[in-house]
Amino acid sequence: MVSEGELVEGGLEPVEPQEARNSVHIGPLSPASFSIPFEGGKARIIGLLDGQIYTKEIIEEVKVIDGKVVAWPERDILKLAVVERHTASGRIGLGLLKGLGLKRGAVASSIAHDSHNLIVVGVEERDMFKAAAGVREMGGGIVVVKDGAILSSIRLEIGGLMTFKSAETVARQLRQTKDAIRALGSNLPDPVMAISFLALPVIPELKLTDRGLVDVDKHSFVPLFVKES
């Protein structure tokens, strides 16, 4: 406790909130969990705006192989998923993202404002699963994966949002994580922050939750695919 610039109470031990540990509870998960069956037409894509937490709705053609939508890194179209992580309900919202710039690999994070479900973005379904499984095994945090190998991780064991590690340690790990994401192709100044707001359905224009895509301006869920008239 500090009063008028003077320490008046100190030496207290931090309280470890045990109920906030082990907060990642997700249903059965596999690479196939991130598969998107093609339903025809074009797709609604979440478009990142550099330096903003707003997004824009982009409607474009998608790449389809064997009836499944796949990432199209040449056009900066990535797969996006929000996995409910509080009650192991098994709910997974699937969508597409443009603007992050990944050429390969995947990123998963338990920081996803405001519900803080597990958000996963990537090129390959296997890497998306590996990243998501890594966050689950740590009890929360951020994981960056390339070709099935973890490049960087930050363990956030308190609610999937905080840690008892020192500020210096977390700052170093965060720099390493951002560098790892940039090594996968992103040129955003803060890709971790950008990813963390993709599931916030109160900030326009298009966001993804564990229940599906949300058109924030219309206050309604919208389908991923736009049927051609």
Image (cartoon, rainbow, N blue to C red):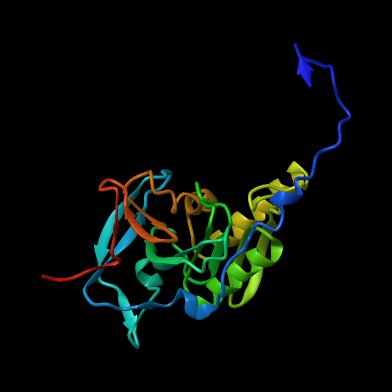
* Residue at 60% in and 61% down: 180
Residue 84 location in percent, x, y?
A: 52, 61
Is residue 204 or residue 148 the one in the foreground? 204
Examine the rendering and report whether any part of residue 36 can be seen.
yes
Locate the N terminus and report the quarter of the image it occupies: top right
* Residue at 69% in and 50% down: 20
* Residue at 63% in and 60% down: 24
Farthest residue in the left direction? 229
Classify residue 180 as left or right of residue 218. Answer: right
Residue 182 location in percent, x, y?
A: 54, 59
Residue 224 location in percent, x, y?
A: 30, 66
Q: Tell me how many marks there are.
A: 0
Residue 140 image-quadrant placement: bottom right
Locate the C terminus and report the quarter of the image it occupies: bottom left
Residue 41 image-quadrant placement: bottom left
* Residue at 68% in and 56% down: 154
Residue 36 location in percent, x, y?
A: 38, 76
Farthest residue in the top direction? 4
Examine the rendering and report whether any part of residue 124 can be seen.
no
Classify residue 45 as left or right of residue 119. Answer: left
Classify residue 42 as left or right of residue 213. Answer: left
Is residue 95 or residue 15 the one in the foreground? 15
